[in-house]
Every structure is written in C-alpha cells, then in structure tokens.
Image (tube, coloured by chain):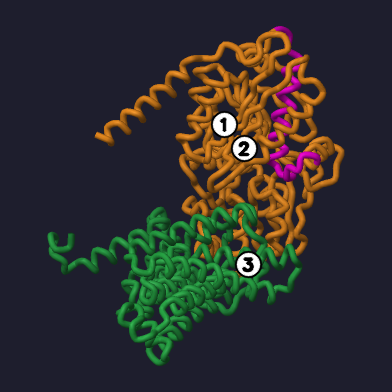
Chain colours: A orange, B green
Amino acid sequence: MKKRIVSFAAMAAVAALALTGCAGGDDGGGGEGSPIKIGSVNTLSGAATFPEASAAAKAVFDRVNAKGGVNGHKIEYNTVDDKGDPASATAAARELVGSDEVVALVGGASLIECEINKDYYKQEGVYSIPGIGVDTGCFDSPNIAPVNIGPFNDMTLTLLNGSENLKLDNICVMLEIAGSTKPAYMAGVDRWTKITGKKPLLVDDTVPYGGSDYTPYIVKAKEAGCKAIAVNAIEPDAIGQVKAAQAQGWDDVTFLFLTSVYSDNFAKALDWTGAGAHIPAEFYPFTEESEINADWKSLMEENKIPLTSFSQGGYLAATNFLKVVEGMKGDITRESVAKALDDMAPIDNDMVASPYQFSKVAAQDFEPGAWPVVLKSGTNAWKKSAEDWLMVPSK
Amino acid sequence: MSGGALLQGALAGLAAGGLYAVLAVTLTLMSRLVRVVNFAQAATGMFAAFSAVWFASELGLPTWLATIIGVLVGALLSGIIGWIAATWLAEATVTLRSAMTVAPLLLLISLSFIIFGNKPQPFAPVLSGPAFKVAGVVVSWVTVVMVVLAILVAVACSLLLRRTTIGTKLRALSERPTTAELIGIAAKPLSIGVWAVTGAISAITIMVIAPSQSNDAISLSMLIIPASAAALLGGFKRLDLAVVGGLALGMITGIVAQIPDVSFIRNFIPFFFIVILLLWSQRKEVWDAAR
C-alpha cells in the first residue's frame, strides 16, 4: 500500500511539472519599471562544477542594477543548480521558464543542460545565451547560442595550432568520450583533415574519463610513434596524463589540450610538460596583462570571482545581452527579447575572435577562432604563443 | 596485436597494480583483525595527502615535515573512525560496521571539497622519473616503490601476526573477542591501533602515487573499488593473495588498454573481477543452501 502511495505521489509530481511547463509565461518584465527576469541553469555541485560563469554574469547585472538598471528596469537574476544530473536539469529549466517566467537564459555553464532542455526552450520560445556551452546540445539548437566556440571547434583549433603553428607531424588524437560526444569530436578532427589534408596518426577514443592512472594509454601513444597528442581532457585527467608521460620519460612529447585546462591551478600543478602543453584559448588570454580584459578583470576581482575562461564567458554573455536589451523599445517580454536577439547587429568585442550575432552563432555559421597559449616546462605559467587569433577558415 | 605490446601494457599497469595491492592488504588486515571492510580507506589516504600539500603550500613547511604530518593525519583520521567503531559498534555485525564506514567516506570527500576546493592538488613528487627500461617500457620509480611496498607491507604484517605477542593478541581478538577480553586483552586500544596503522599506510601510499596520476578527491577516494576487488581474491583473509590480486588487476587493466577491440570494457574490469571471484568461490554451493 505504502509503495502505491509513493508512486502515486511521484506521478502527481511529474504531472504537476509537466503542467507548469505548459503554462507558458506571458511576461517577465512587461510594464513600466517592472524587473526583467533572467535565469541560468548551471552545474554548481557534483563531479565537475562550473560556478564562475553565472557568478560573473551576476556581477555584471549587479553593477547595472547599482546604476539604476536598464532603461529603468532592474534585473532579477536567478541561478539554479542542475547538479550535473538530468532530472535536476529538467526541473531547473521548468522552474526558471515555467514558474519564474524568465525572458531569457543568460550566462550559464552546465555539463548537460543544453542537450536535455533544448526542445523545451524551443517549445516555450525562450532564448539561451550560455556563458560556456559544454555539451553538443549547446551547438545545434536555434534557441541556444553560447558565447564560447565550444569543445568541438576547440579540437579543430588545437590540431591546427599543432600542425600549422608548431609544424608538428604524427599528431595522435586521444578522446575521453562522455555520453554521445564522439561524433561531434570526430567531426572536429575531420574538419582539421579537410583544411590541412593531414590525418591523425592514431585515434584512441577509449581513454577513460576521470581515470586514475593513464600510463597504459600514454605508453600506447608513445609506442605508436606520436610526436604530439591532442586530448580533450578536463583538468584532473590532463594532469594525470602529463604526469604519466613524465614518469615514462617521454621528454619530446607535445600536448595539445583544450581550453578546459587553461587555468592558473593547472599551471601551478605541473612543472614538467614535455615539449610544452598548448591550448587554444577561447577568449583573449587572461594570463596576459592587457587593456582588453581590464574591465572583466577588475569586476571579477571586486567580486572575488576566480579569473578563468568560465568567468570570461559569463561576463561576455551578460554584457552582450545587456547591449541588446538597452537598444529595445517597448515592453520587454520573452517574445520581444527573442525578436531583438534575432535582429541584433553583430557585437564586436576584443575578448573574442569573431563578432557575436545570436542567429549566426546558433546556426554555427561563423568563423571560430582562439588565441594559442602555451605552458612550457619549468615555468608554471601560461604564455601567449601567437600574436593573433588562430581562425578556422570558413567551410 | 603482438606479445610485446601486451607485455608493455602489463608493465604499464604495474604501478596501478601495486597501489591496488597495498590498499587490498590494508583492507584484508582490517577485515581479519577488526571485522570491517573499510570503505573510507582510500579516502583517508586522500585527505591525509591533501593535508600534507596544504601544510607545504599554505604554511610553507618543508616537504619532509609536511609528509610526516600528513601520515599522522591519516593515522589520526583512521583512528577516530576506529574509535567510533570500537565504542558504539563493538558487538555489531561486520555488515553494520562496514556500512558505517560509508559515512566517513562521503564526509571526507565533502570536507576536502570544502577545505581544499574541488580541483586537483599541486603535489610535489616525492619520487619521479624512470627507474629502468624493460621491453621498451620505462618502469618508473613510482612503480618500483609501489610493488615493493605492497610486498613489504604484506610480509611485515604476516610476520607481525604470526611471530609477535601483539600479533597473537590481535588474532585472538578477531577470532574470539569475548574470550580474549575475559583473559585481559585490551580490545579497544588494540583495534584502534590497527585502524591507525592502516590509515598511516594508506596515507603513505596515496602520497607516493598522487603526484604521478589524477589526484582529485573523487578519483583518489574511488580507488577503494579496485582495491576491494583485489582483496576479494584472498577472500579478505589472505594477504599474499591480496597482493597477487592487486598486481593482476593492474596488469589486466594495462593489457586491456592496448587492445582496441576490448578496451571499452576497461571501466568494468574490477566489476568483472568481483563477479568471477564470487561465482568461483560459490561454485560448490548448492543453490538452496547458498541462499
């Protein structure tokens, strides 16, 4: 009996959720002086966490609110945690879009959220500008346009950096596949092959995600005669791979990682990186002193937010969104925001390689670029390794 | 697929194997002497190692001193868990005592997130670099030390149990706890001592291995899974088989990584290992009786 009651309650809860999902919002900031409601779904707890993006977006909105808001409207920003868990991600989106009735989603960073919620966003007509898009769903939906170029373009760029800038041959690709990301990464590799006519010496897509000892995989690559390995590892795994190579005495290997390992913590953790660890930074390198990052940097330091690519993404998503909203006439509703984003003029910002235009980015119809950065052995610090953006030529 | 590549894979997995073996030995000791399968074994070592890094980087202590403090932290943490088990769960079943250790496992992971953050720690390697080459594979110092450590710990423990008074008392306590207490053996200090020693061994192990592999809280704490699989080979009773199990598991994992057709199963190897061992150990059981 008890079991039956529990399952009935669960069914009722699901039904209630579904209903709130259908009760599409009418406005989140219609009338004069009413607040503009914005939200974001983020992975704030769990195995991998990305708290900086939404924290940075919040800092931007708080600064605007302190000056009286946008055209007299204060911004209400609500960040929800999806715990890296599909059920929570679904619930988080319904909470924001269904019950809070946000006009848009801005500045989030989640492991899984796009893939799970993209159809719901489409159904509700709500647009999302993630600070950092991670999963494949962020890059193939007309309603989602992240400010970053994403791990799959990153893969193409890190290979381009290796083969064209560093003139390396015998590059091997080692992939850690989580979920259904393999085709997207392979498309990134194929794009590099199309541009350069070069093929990877070896593709190993069996590298474990969150493994502990990577020695067997490093030995395999070394034996195959790889001069460089392009890996899509997250920070702890990348550290493990570099250390395994160090233990094997593989001194002439070059590591081609993705933006995900671009952090001070990573640089501090490794004083040996073989012939160097190279990454294409998706935003202008924050480890360089430059006017380009000055406003972002001072705002982050003021709010005690770590200086990472993630906080750059959150900051950019929020500033781009504010630019669009500032130029809007009339009521600010979900529909009018979506229309404004559709019709927006491209926003140029020196922190990124290409101008941001929602519809173009959502269709992945732009030239992705990144700034090559290197971590050399014994320096414990990232350095620019090029004087300009490295671009993927258009298809 | 050549035999050479397989041999290389086996050698490449040896460091991990040594690590599993040491942890399996400590697990076996715990199960024999204090009737518990300690799920927090690797987590204790992880927390101790992170503390050592913190003492070195935040307080600027020299590495050797921070290392010693780390080992003491490991012994202390494990001792505290042992004290809880000895105080409130002295008469409880093995199952209940083991289930209790899941709490400190989760607590230590969360605590390390809160205190040290959820990023990998910058470990200064105590040992690094290649020791010698076999069949084109570099065998690193870490590998040598781990394998030697596993064998040493197992031999030392079995000598201690067989040849010393303390060993006899410990065996008595684990086999006939009530009788042992009646003839005047102090149960509580002895069992807490066992906890503390295994905690210290775990801390040393993790400190040796952490600089050369992924070292975030989760991946280090979850080493308990392959270690348990290795300890199962000796049925949580035999130290020698625990060492063999650990080394074998590491080598199998290394070999599987070299064969593209089967490498997708690498994450399940400890699980297969466990299932096969359980089936084998139950092979003589009649269905009804075994249930």
In the image, is residue B231 above or below residue A331?
below
**Three-letter amino acid code at disc 2?**
Gly
The kind of secondary structure element at disc 1 is helix
Q: What is the C-alpha distance between the residues marked 3 and 1?
A: 36 Å
* Marked residue nearer the N-terminal end (1 or 2): 1
Q: Are marks 1 and 2 in contact (CB under 8 Å)?
A: yes
Q: Residue A204 at what x, y percent from top left?
A: 50, 53
**Three-letter amino acid code at disc 3?**
Gln
Q: Are marks 3 and 1 in contact (CB under 8 Å)?
A: no
Residue denoted by label 2: A150
The kind of secondary structure element at disc 3 is helix
Q: What is the C-alpha distance between the residues marked 3 and 2?
A: 29 Å
Position of A97 with respect to A279 (left or right) is: left
**Image point 69% across, 14% down: which residue?**
A34
Q: Which quarter of the image is occupied by the C terminus of chain A?
A: top right
Q: Residues within 10 Å of mark 2 (few under 14, many from 20)?
A: many
Foreground mark, 3 or 1, reads 1
Residue B233 visible in the snapshot:
yes
Residue denoted by label 1: A138
Q: Is residue A318 magenta?
A: yes
Q: Chain of mark 2?
A: A
Magenta residues span A302-330
* Marked residue nearer the N-terminal end (3 or 1): 1
Nearer to me, B136 or A45? A45
Please tell me whether the stretch drawn in magenta is mainly helix, strand or loop: helix
Q: Are marks 3 and 2 in contact (CB under 8 Å)?
A: no
Q: Dividing the picture into quarters, in which one does residue A363 lie?
A: top right
